[in-house]
């Protein structure tokens, strides 16, 4: 699914960065700036919902689209 979304958004001119597990996603979200974040609920290392909770608890207000 990530490869398909990467291609679709890139074709529309968006810069896309894919993190293949929640730990990498957490690190990327805390160290870079994004216009939006797409999170899959079923991520390796930690659940996508736990990732969103971790980001929000650190004050991140970037819009997040949750895929289930």
Image: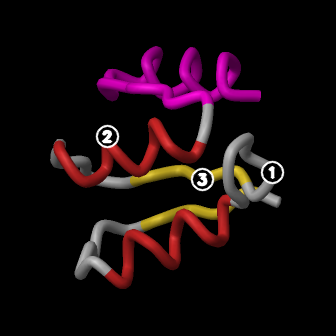
Q: Secondary structure at mark 2?
A: helix
Image position, residue 35 (x, y; %): 26, 52
Q: Secondary structure at mark 3?
A: strand
Which residue in the structure is indicated by mark 3? 39
Q: Is residue 62 above or below residue 10?
A: below
Image position, residue 54 (x, y; %): 45, 72
Which residue in the structure is indicated by mark 2? 28
Which residues are the magenta region?
A: 1-20
Q: Residues within 10 Å of mark 2 (few under 14, many from 20)?
A: some
Label of residue 54 in the image:
none
Q: CA distance from mark 2 to mark 3?
A: 12 Å
Q: Is residue 3 above or below residue 16?
A: above
Q: Secondary structure at mark 1?
A: loop
Mark in the foreground, 2 or 3: 2
Q: Along the horizontal axis of the image, is 42 left or right of 30?
A: right
Rendered image quadrant of residue 15: top left
């Amino acid at each position: 699914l990530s490869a398909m979304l990467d291609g679709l958004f890139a074709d529309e001119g968006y810069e896309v960065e894919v993190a293949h597990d929640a730990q990498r996603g957490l690190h990327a979200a805390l160290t870079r700036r994004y216009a939006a974040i797409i999170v899959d609920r079923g991520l390796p290392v930690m659940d996508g919902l736990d990732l969103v909770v971790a980001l929000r608890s650190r004050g991140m207000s970037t819009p997040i689209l949750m895929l289930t």
